Amino acid sequence: MQSRAFITGVSGPELSPAERAFVREERPWGFILFKRNIDTPSQVSALVRELQGAVDRPDAPVLIDQEGGRVQRLGPPHWPVYPAGALFGVLYDIDRALGLSAARLSARLIAADLSDSGVTVDCLPLADVPAPGADAVIGNRAYGAEPKKVAAIARAVTEGLQQGGILPVLKHIPGHGRATADTHLRLPKVDTPLAELQRTDFAAFQPLADLPMAMTAHVVFSALDPARPATTSATIIEQVIRGMIGFQGLLMSDDVSMNALSGTIAERTQAIFGAGCDVALHCNGKLEEMADVARNTPELSGQALKRAQRALASRKPPQAFDRLRARAELDALIERAGTAGA
């Protein structure tokens, strides 16, 4: 039976009977985990199996935001702490090879953690290029302020994830770095001229256009569409994401429930698909909202289905590596960055 074109969160560390019935009936394409879903490694593995079993699809993607720094859903005492993305930028400025090596090592170790738990997709890397005066919601999650540097580090992160058998999600396309508000709270508007956006923000995403999946930004770019954020703007999706940037993979929205979007959950979901997103993402685990998303989500079909199939087919088995040695190498690089004033 065909999946519906949405990814859903759930409310806790195991499915409630109502959630299990919802998942079986509505058939989401994938799932996303948050800290409320995390207890122990064995519990996470059991939840992943339960989610995939509920849709009778062992390959149903299970996503998580595991960046390192302040965005890390798996953490102590069962999982190690990883550095924020800015550290890779500090090392890159000391020595390009060191920065890329640290980014790759960190992502490879994260991939090993995720693979152990059955999680198959990490919402990483970021290609956002922060600008002076922007909200701190991106902040030290970013790899730097120069597009080529950001793209190079993002590519190294991608390589580390893929070597560990984890699919990457490029975010937040076409750029969140200039946003002057946290999109969890309100809608930011960027008035930067198009030529400057092309030179900076969009330029960081272009070298990464081959990635299998990407997540949109709930950000208005007035030079292109003064009324709608990228997530619900057909103009931006067609002309910028698919056009200027050249991304042809599976395009998912950022979270439907974030306050940057206006209207009811149903209206937001309709707008997401109307603009050209392939998949809607709903994160908060509220069953009533999940049902609204499902009712307004089409079957995954046509070009969206082909993109989803290509994305899943691009996932390769993990390559062998020495985890203890990799962690020691990463710790040494973190110490070096700290010495340099990170």
Image: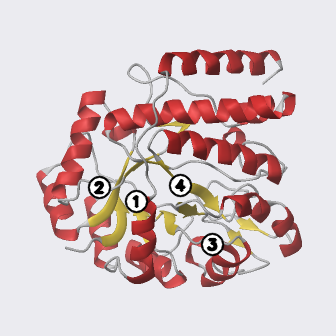
Using the rendered view, name the quadrant where residue 174 is placed.
Answer: bottom right
Q: Residue at x 19, y 47 (%)?
A: 50
Q: Position of residue 245 (x, y in %)?
A: 71, 70
Please give the label number shown on residue 321: none
> In whole angstroms, how far apart are the C-alphas of marks 2 and 1?
8 Å
Above or below — where is 106 with respect to 233?
A: above
Q: Earlier in the sequence, mark 2 or mark 1?
A: 2
Mark number displayed over residue 59: 2
Residue 175, image x, y percentages: 70, 61
Q: Nearer the viewer, residue 103 or 7?
A: 103
Which is more N-terminal, label 3 or label 1? 3
Residue under label 4: 169
Q: Is there CB contact under 8 Å for labels 2 and 1?
A: yes
Decide: few, some or many residues near mark 4? Use Cα within 10 Å; few <14, some 14-19, many ≥20: many
Q: On the image, numbered disc 1 is attached to which residue?
A: 312
Q: Earlier in the sequence, mark 1 or mark 4?
A: 4
Under tag 1, what secondary structure? helix
For residue 230, the mark is 3
CA distance separating discs 2 and 4 = 17 Å
Q: CA distance from mark 1 to mark 3?
A: 25 Å
Q: Mark 2 vs mark 4: give the one in front.
A: 2
Which class describes the residues within 10 Å of circle 2: few (<14), some (14-19), or many (20+)? some
Q: Amino acid at mark 3?
A: Ala
13 relative position to 193: left or right: left
Q: Quadrant of the C terminus?
A: top right
Looking at the image, do the residues carrying marks 2 and 3 touch, with CB atoms under 8 Å apart?
Answer: no
Q: Is residue 291 left or right of residue 203?
A: left
- Rounded to the nearest angstrom, the CA distance separating label 4 from label 3 is 17 Å
Establish if 225 lies above or below 3: below
